[in-house]
Image (cartoon, grey):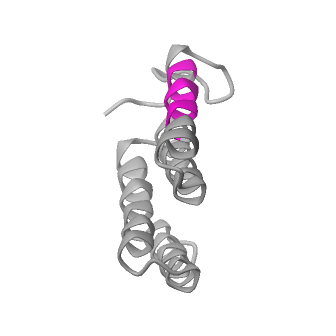
Amino acid sequence: MATSESRAPADVPNLYDGLAVIVALSILAWAFLYAIQPIFGLLLTVAFGSAYAAGRIDDLEHAVVVAGLWGLVLVAFWVIGTYLGVGAAAILAVIVYGRWHGVW
């Protein structure tokens, strides 16, 4: 596991940040132009960005937890298909994240 001394500071951009921006813009372009599902594309982009940021700021375990909880929200969006279902899944994901991270 990497220690904090061997990691680059989170506020200093690196090459992976540029690649993450390209991936995020590609997701948005796909959602708006090809799939014609802009809300789903925005959710995917925010999910990717927050998982990347969690991995960049903290460690891989944090990124996996954030990505998994976003996966729960995206599955709720795909299966239930209503904003109420997505909201409920998002609230549950925030509660689970808070319990995992030791906030509550």
Residue 23, percent across and down? 49, 30
How many labels sit on residues? 0
Of residue 32 and residue 87, the one placed in the foreground of this image is: 32
List the single residue furthest toward the left.
Answer: 1
Residue shown at 45% from the left, 69% from the top = 73
Q: Quadrant of residue 12?
A: top right
Q: What residue span does the magenta drawing correspond to?
A: 18-27
- Residue 22 painted magenta: yes
- Location of the C terminus (image quadrant): bottom right
Of residue 99 and residue 73, the one placed in the foreground of this image is: 73
Of residue 92 and residue 82, the one placed in the foreground of this image is: 82
User: In the image, is 91 to the left or to the right of 71?
Assistant: right
Give the overall secondary structure of the magenta segment.
helix
Residue 13, percent across and down? 63, 19
Residue shown at 49% from the left, 66% from the top = 101
Residue shown at 56% from the left, 35% from the top = 29
Residue 5, percent across and down? 50, 23
Residue shown at 49% from the left, 23% from the top = 7
List the single residue furthest toward the right.
Answer: 11
Is 65 situated above or below 75? above
User: In the image, is 63 to the left or to the right of 20?
Assistant: left
- Location of the N terminus (image quadrant): top left
User: In the image, is 71 to the left or to the right of 98?
Assistant: left
Is 34 situated above or below 37? above
